[in-house]
Image (cartoon, rainbow, N blue to C red):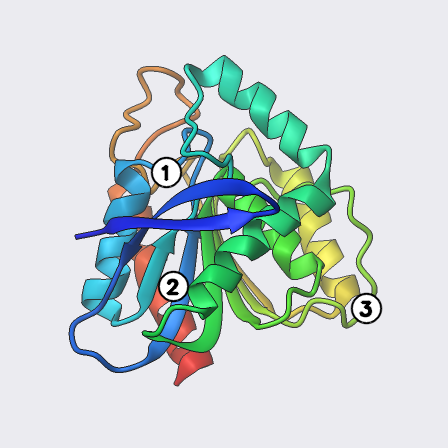
Amino acid sequence: MTTPFRYDDAGTACHGDLALPAGDGRVPGIALFPDISGVGDHTRKWADRIAGELGYVALAADTYGEGRKPADFGEGLAWIEEWRSDTPRLVRRARAALDALAGHPRCDGRLAAIGFCFGGAVILELARAGTPGMVAGVSFHGALQTTTKVAPGAITAKLLVCHGAEDPMADYGVLGAFLGEMREAGADCQTIAYTGVVHSFTNEAQDGSFNPALKFNAAANRRSWRAMAAHFEEVFG
């Protein structure tokens, strides 16, 4: 079960939720960045599973600050556009979560981050910024586009990108451009594209009724979890 975990970013209170593994040993920390809706049941459930099944400290991070959640999808899109138009601010907010996680007594200082949809974009911008201490990142159905120019060798985190091949929000052209970006940056980036799968495939609340591009896929959800677990096992040992 997660518990409230407050931290600060330049005077803005962030309302995260923390899940701890059994025991009292020090272990790696994983920050989770939510989708457009902000911290909610989906992110908390993943934090619980990461702590309970994989044995890491897990923090569901509050990207918007003050525990805010958009009133509807339209407002959420406006908030995302605002945040993505100011990448340094977005990276600073995300780093505040990683810094807070690193300071927890159960965290051994080794850090990774995962993100869903908008949160996936957050992960990739953290990696492009060469965030100190972040050794791994995983994007689930994340936005792949960026305006950030990355120098070769700047991305030091080992990345895993789990992508719905039929996701209209990041189509084949976008995916191809992203792969080219990772190649030119010399990044260690595994990219898995699940055919027949669209956006939000890890979110059981999305059944396609609101938008056919947003739909849970049990197989992709299961496979991407296993891919993430293997990625962390490789990085952390």
Q: Is 196 placed above or below 182 here?
A: above
Residue 57 - label: none
| Residue 21 spot, x, y in % from top left | 21, 69
Q: Secondary structure at mark 2?
A: helix
Point 27% across, 46% down: residue: 44
| Residue 76 spot, x, y in % from top left | 50, 22
| Residue 50 spot, x, y in % from top left | 28, 61
Q: Nearer the viewer, residue 38 or 66?
A: 66
Alpha-carbon distance for marks 2 and 3?
25 Å
Residue 228 - label: 2
The extreme front residue here reads 11
Quadrant of res 25: bottom left
Alpha-carbon distance for marks 2 and 1?
20 Å
Q: Nearer the viewer, residue 183 or 49?
A: 49
Q: Is 16 placed above or below 41 here?
A: below
Q: Amino acid at mark 2?
A: Met
Point 20% across, 66% down: residue: 53
Q: Nearer the viewer, mark 2 or mark 1?
A: 1
Does 27 sit left or right of 120 as displayed? Answer: left
User: Nearer the N terminus, badge 1 or badge 3?
Assistant: 1
Neighbour class for label 3 at 10 Å: few (<14), some, many (≥20)? few
Mark 3 lies on residue: 152
Q: Is 213 placed above or below 198 here?
A: above
- Do residues under tags 1 and 3 come within 8 Å of each other at their CB atoms? no
Neighbour class for label 1 at 10 Å: few (<14), some, many (≥20)? many
Alpha-carbon distance for marks 1 and 3?
34 Å
Quadrant of res 26: bottom left
Q: Nearer the viewer, residue 40 or 213?
A: 40
Q: Amino acid at mark 3?
A: Pro
User: Nearer the N terminus, badge 2 or badge 3?
Assistant: 3
